[in-house]
Amino acid sequence: MPEQTLAEAWGLVPAVLGIVAVGLVLGVVVAVVDRIVVFGASGAAVEPIRSSARLLVEQRRTTLAPDRLLWRTGCVAVPTLALLSLAVVPVAGRTLWSTGADLVWFNAMEALLWAAVWLVGWGPNAVHALTGGYRFLGQGLAYELPLMFALITAGLAAGSLRTTDVLAAQERLWFVVTMPVAFVVFVASAAAFAFWGPFAAPAAADIAGGVTSELSGVDRLLVEAGRTVFLGASAAMAAALFLGGESGPWLPGPLWHLLKTLAVVAALVWVGRRMPVLRPDRTVEVGWMVLVPLTLLQALVVAVLVLNGFYA
């Protein structure tokens, strides 16, 4: 019998509130680490809260003949999908609910995030926002397949698409040891979907902020919060799928998962802030010409190991 989900163990409402709280904490952690990397530790914990409060009272910007329904839908969908991606990330060894194909669920949330960010660019009826939206479409298409192959590789080794099963399969050996390419590609693809670091061309300065150029007030807060929450959720998922999640000596399991998640977040932010923003055509070229073949080769290696009983 499968283990109880968080919703079954705690009740649906407490479990949902718990996942939302975890998501918000992860978002704040990403923002604080980013602040520390860029400006140092001074005011790192206070500035994200201050900025959020400022955006809450800021007046929304308007443009000529915007599609307000699609615009607002996109802004709300970005943080919503980021939180929904957390529904299948193991928390204390359990997920919010079990879909039977948790890895597919996580990938589906990213695919929908792709559409949501494009709506954020389309809705304002402004050239820079639309250009950023189309940049994100191209980038998302190029990194969707590598990310999917990385997820499938972890599921292949575990013999299951449930994240709790993938977690349990790493009791003897963390998957990052035998699938380092899948781990790096997963993290890089997550950064691309959050248009973070070298993948920030959809919101780059050369198009006046691109997909975020017309955002202000609550709309900007929602989109920026969604980006940071998704980056944090992806770090938590990477820790679960490739770094053993809760496995580790001496410390309680959930604390190990937290420490590994923080390590991935710190690496993402530190590397992202020290690399230049890549040209959109370069990021797309790397996705199609480099990452897709590499992840397929990684999947082949793991398949051979499975056939030889390595993960048994």
Image (spheres, rainbow, N blue to C red):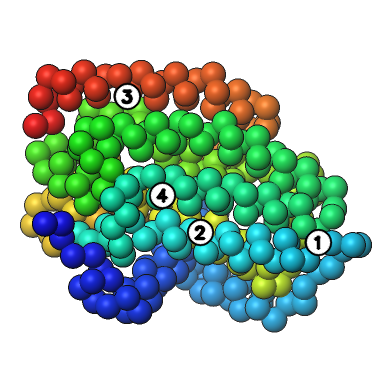
Q: Amino acid at mark 2?
A: Leu
Residue where numbered disc 3 is placed: 299
Q: Amino acid at mark 4?
A: Phe
**Quick one: label 2 or label 4, which is nearer the N terminus?**
2
SS for callout 2: helix
Label ID, residue 106: 4
The residue positioned farthest toward the right in the image shown: 64
**Quick one: label 1 or label 2, which is nearer the N terminus?**
1
Q: Is residue 261 visible?
A: no
**Quick one: label 4 or label 1, which is nearer the N terminus?**
1
| Tag nearer the camera, 3 or 1 | 1
The CA span between labels 2 and 4 is 10 Å
Residue 25 image point, x, y percent: 41, 68
The CA span between labels 3 and 4 is 19 Å
Residue 108 image point, x, y percent: 47, 47
SS for callout 4: helix
Q: Amino acid at mark 1?
A: Asp
Name the residue at 54% across, 69% down.
48
The CA span between labels 1 and 2 is 21 Å
Name the residue at 12% across, 19% down.
308
Label ID, residue 312: none
SS for callout 3: helix
The CA span between labels 4 and 1 is 29 Å
Residue where numbered disc 2 is placed: 81
Q: Amino acid at mark 3?
A: Ala
Question: Which one is nearer the viewer's eye here, 100 or 276?
Answer: 100
**Quick one: label 3 or label 2, which is nearer the N terminus?**
2
Viewed as shown, does residue 73 lie left or right of 310?
A: right
Label ID, residue 67: 1
Viewed as shown, does residue 90 lie left or right of 227?
A: left
